[in-house]
Structures are given as C-alpha cells and as structure tokens.
Amino acid sequence: MHSAPLYQNIAAKIGLTAAEFEVIAACFTLRTISRKALLAVESEKNDKMFFVQQGLLFSFKTLDNGERQVIQFAKEQYWIADLCSFFSGSTALFSIAALEDCVLWEITRQDFDRVCRQFPAMETFFRLNFQQSYVNTLIRLSDAYSTDAELRYGRLLETQPDLLQRVPQYLIASYLGILPSSLSRIRSRV
C-alpha cells in the first residue's frame, strides 16, 4: 500500500479500521515534487496541508533584505502547512519549499473539513498534532529569548541530528537565529 506511512502516522494516534482509512486516504492527493519546488508562497492564499512521506521541506519568511528566516523543517512523518492561511483563508505568512525531492500527501481545507466531519477521530488526530506543534513553537520561542545560540544548537544536535546532515548550514543558522559565521564557531567548539 503506497499510503502505508500516512496510515501509520494516523493510526499511531487514533483507532482506525482499514476501511475507514481507505475513505480518508481518498481525500488526500499523493504528490512528488522536486528539490526547490514551492508549495506555498507568503502573501498568497494556500489551502493545503502536507504530510511528508519522503524528503524534507522547510517554511520560511522572506525578510526585507531578501534573506530567508527559517521557521520550521518537516521531514519524514511530519506535517506542514501555513496554518494561518489554511484555517482563515487569508494570505500565507510563510513560504514552504522543498530541500530535497519529496513524496507528499496533500489535503485541501475542503477535504480536511469533510474528513473531520465524517470521522470525528480525525478531528482528534489533527487536534493532537496542532497541540504538539503549538507546544514546540512555544518552546522554540522561549529558547530564542532565553538560551544562547550554543544551547539551541546543542538541543537541535540532540533532538534532530539528521537535520545537520541534510540541511545547508546557512539554513540551520537561520533556524537558530544566528549568523552562519557564528554557527561555524559553535560547531568547531562542539
């Protein structure tokens, strides 16, 4: 079954029969995209959410000077969207781009609403995901204001060491809120 990773991700949090999953999976579109492809563009509407089966995505804000401020990374088994645009219908706050060739499961807001109405357990599934995402965002925000760059790098090294191999260093530096030269100094000390 091509959708096995999607099924495993959902079934890990809620009870789901194979028949129910088949109906749910029909609301998703399997997409293959190339490295550097854009899935969402800030200041444009985006009504899609993505589950990463294979590959690596990142979301970012383009600063006035043209540089990208990395907001998050989404690797295998992660979900990503510009939730502001997805839920409100407003324009996206962030862009989402592929760092690697990717295989994704995409769901539109309309299909998301239909799945949640038809299968209340899916509403629970997404609520649990959004809660964890919110907690992670608060931790990251707290860290940005209360811990030094070396501690933030150490936490990333401890929790997601694979990202350090898969992501260009200038994007890691952006994600940590430091200059690439500062990241080089931290890496040489660690």
Image: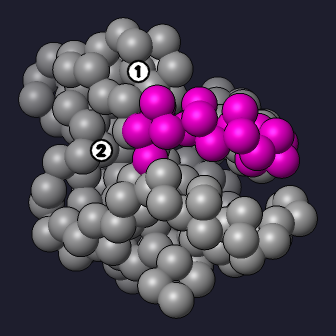
Under circle 1, the secondary element is helix
Query: What is the distance, in whole Å, between disc 2 and disc 1 at their CAs?
Result: 12 Å
Describe residue 52's horizontal placement relative to residue 65 as left or right: right
- In this rendered view, identify the residue nearer to me: 29 or 97: 29
Position of residue 8 relative to residue 107, above or below, is: below
140 inside magenta stretch: no
Under circle 2, the secondary element is strand
Quarter of the image where the C terminus is located: bottom right
- In this rendered view, identify the residue nearer to me: 15 or 158: 15
Q: What percent of the width, then of the height, locates residue 82?
A: 42, 32
- In this rendered view, identify the residue nearer to me: 55 or 160: 55
**According to the image, what is the colour scheme of the structure?**
one colour
- Callout 2 environment at 10 Å: few (<14), some (14 to 19), or many (20+)? many
Position of residue 170 relative to residue 30, above or below, is: above
- In this rendered view, identify the residue nearer to me: 81 or 57: 81
Q: What percent of the width, then of the height, locates residue 45?
A: 27, 20
117 inside magenta stretch: yes
Q: How many marks?
A: 2
Residue occupying the point 48% across, 52% down? 27
Describe residue 12's horizontal placement relative to residue 159 as left or right: right
Magenta residues span: 107-124
Question: Residue 7 appears in which quarter of the rendering?
Answer: bottom right
From the image, tell me which residue sits under label 1. 85
Position of residue 95 relative to residue 34, above or below, is: above
Q: Which mark is residue 38?
A: none
Q: Which mark is residue 96?
A: 2
Residue type pointed to by label 1: Ser
